Each structure stands twice: as structure tokens, then as C-alpha cells.
Image: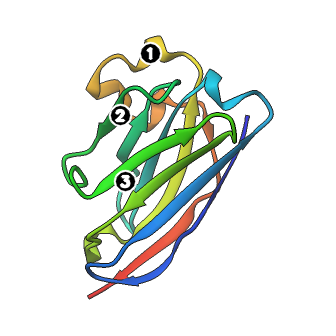
Amino acid sequence: VQLQASGGGLVQAGGSLRLSCGASGRPSSYYVMGWFRQAPGKEREFVAAVSKMGGNTYYANSVKGRFTISRDNAKSDMYLQMNSLKPEDTAVYYCTAEANAGTLLSSRARSSPRSYEYWGEGTLVTVSS
């Protein structure tokens, strides 16, 4: 599967952005999908993940209540609605996918970049104070 993230940009603190991730190749329903982000000088960190059919969602504590992950398998798209953005949300955001859901059963596994096989190019989100 090939992944392409879009929707990043510059926004003021308190504002909103919606990221999209388009999947091509194998149907997106084959994959658990998620978002990670990486700020300058920092390690890539987990943001959110969604199960293959969209019934289960998982969030990092830092974004819980502000971000919403969703997917539309008919369009092979995944989304990240980001509200109440903070300057510390500034990062390059990456979408990712993993076919073997059995390796993502624990929170620790879902939060590790090493658990995901497929990655898209990132999209930059900059939140100004």
C-alpha cells in the first residue's frame, strides 16, 4: 500500500486543521492505520490509530479530547481532525499502516513506530502562539 498525507499548514494556537491520508494499492480495509508525528530534534511519537473497520480508536494522552481519527474505507482515506491546537503540536505528521493487527494488541505496540510497516511522506503542521 502507498500512503500520501496532506492537509498540513500554518495555524494559530486554538485553531483547527484536518489531515488526510490517502491509500492506494491494496484496499485500506486490510490495514490498521495511524498517525505519528515528529518535531525537530525529537523522536517520532504516536498520535492516534484506528482499527481496520474503524470501530476502535486509540489516542496519545497528549491529544485525547482534541484530536479525532477516522477512516472511510470506501474512499481508502483516513483523517485526523485536530482542534484546539497548541504550539507543542508543531511537527511533521506521518500516516502509517500495518496489516497484521495481531501485532498491535497492546498500547505499547500501537505506540511504537517499529510496529508499522508502511509509511507515507509527512505533512508539516505549524502552530503559532
Secondary structure beneath label 2 = strand
The x, y position of residue 28, in whole percent, is 66, 31
- Image quadrant where one finds the C terminus: bottom left
For label 2, the crowd category at 10 Å Cα-Cα, with few meaning under 14, some 14 to 19 and many 20 or more, is some
Q: CA distance from mark 1 to mark 2?
A: 16 Å
For label 3, the crowd category at 10 Å Cα-Cα, with few meaning under 14, some 14 to 19 and many 20 or more, is few
Q: Earlier in the sequence, mark 1 or mark 2?
A: 2
Q: Which residue is mark 1?
A: 103
How many circles with numbers are drawn on the protein? 3
Amino acid type for the residue under numbered disc 2: Thr
**Left or right: 70, with 20 as reference point:** left
| In the rendered image, the vertical position of residue 62 relative to residue 16, given as above or below | above
Q: Residue at x 37, y 29 (%)?
A: 110
The x, y position of residue 26, in whole percent, is 76, 27
Mark 2 near mark 3, Cβ–Cβ under 8 Å? no
As drawn, the label of residue 86 is none
As drawn, the label of residue 57 is 2
Of badges 2 and 3, nearer the viewer stands 2
Amino acid type for the residue under numbered disc 1: Thr
The x, y position of residue 114, in whole percent, is 47, 32
Q: Residue at x 28, y 77 (%)?
A: 87
Q: Earlier in the sequence, mark 2 or mark 3?
A: 3
**Left or right: 16, with 107 as reference point:** right
The x, y position of residue 43, in whole percent, is 37, 53
* Front in this rendered view, residue 75 or 37: 75
Mark 1 near mark 3, Cβ–Cβ under 8 Å? no
Q: Residue at x 25, y 58 (%)?
A: 66
Q: Which residue is mark 3?
A: 43
For label 1, the crowd category at 10 Å Cα-Cα, with few meaning under 14, some 14 to 19 and many 20 or more, is few
